[in-house]
């Protein structure tokens, strides 16, 4: 995973911190067990509140660091994680993915 982190870091630099590339770099840090570093990267780029995938990865990182209070603070109480149920056919894949991440967040929350 060291090579993945190296190249993902280059992507973040070249893309001027694109959220997708920052997420990829945070995932590579997580895979190489650099949990605090992955969390700090997400927090530094202020991505945790933007999408559920960022919140989920941040929560997993904090859980691995045994930072349970901060993990629950990041994950929230679940009231604001609502996924709209009226969607068209093109949104079906995106909404399905959001529901899976929302379920993973609920599982992590306990």
Image (spheres, grey):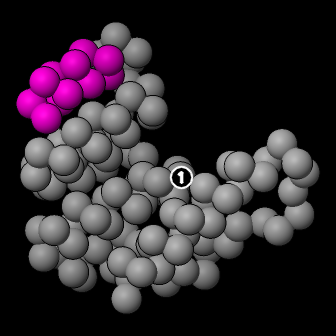
Please give the residue where the numbered disc 1 appears in the rendered image. Answer: 51
Position of residue 56 measured from the top left corner of the image (x, y, whole percent): 40, 62
Position of residue 81 measured from the top left corner of the image (x, y, whole percent): 60, 71
Position of residue 11 measured from the top left corner of the image (x, y, whole percent): 32, 17
User: Which residue ends up furthest to the top in the rendered image?
Assistant: 14
* Residue sitting at x 22%, y 19%: 7
Residue 41 in sight in this render: no
Does residue 72 appear left or right of residue 76 in this picture? left
| Secondary element at tag 1 | loop
Does residue 70 appear left or right of residue 90 in this picture? left
Quarter of the image for residue 46 reads top left
Q: Which residues are magenta?
A: 1-12
Up-down: is 49 above or below 74?
Answer: above
* Residue sitting at x 22%, y 39%: 28
Give the main secondary structure, helix, strand or loop, of the magenta stretch: helix
Quarter of the image for residue 6 reads top left
Up-down: is 47 above or below 71?
Answer: above
Quick check: is 96 in the magenta stretch?
no
Q: Quadrant of the N terminus?
A: top left
* Residue sitting at x 71%, y 67%: 83
Position of residue 106 measured from the top left corner of the image (x, y, whole percent): 47, 80
């Amino acid at each position: 995973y060291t090579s993945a982190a190296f190249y993902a870091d280059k992507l973040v630099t070249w893309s001027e911190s694109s959220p997708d590339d920052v997420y990829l770099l945070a995932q590579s840090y997580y895979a190489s067990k650099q949990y605090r570093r992955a969390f700090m990267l997400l927090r530094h780029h202020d991505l945790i509140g933007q999408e559920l995938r960022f919140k989920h990865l941040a929560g997993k990182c904090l859980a691995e660091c045994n930072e349970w209070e901060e993990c629950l603070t990041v994950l929230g109480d679940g009231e604001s994680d609502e996924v709209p149920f009226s969607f068209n056919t093109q949104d079906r894949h995106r909404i399905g993915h959001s529901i899976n991440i929302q379920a993973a967040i609920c599982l992590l929350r306990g």
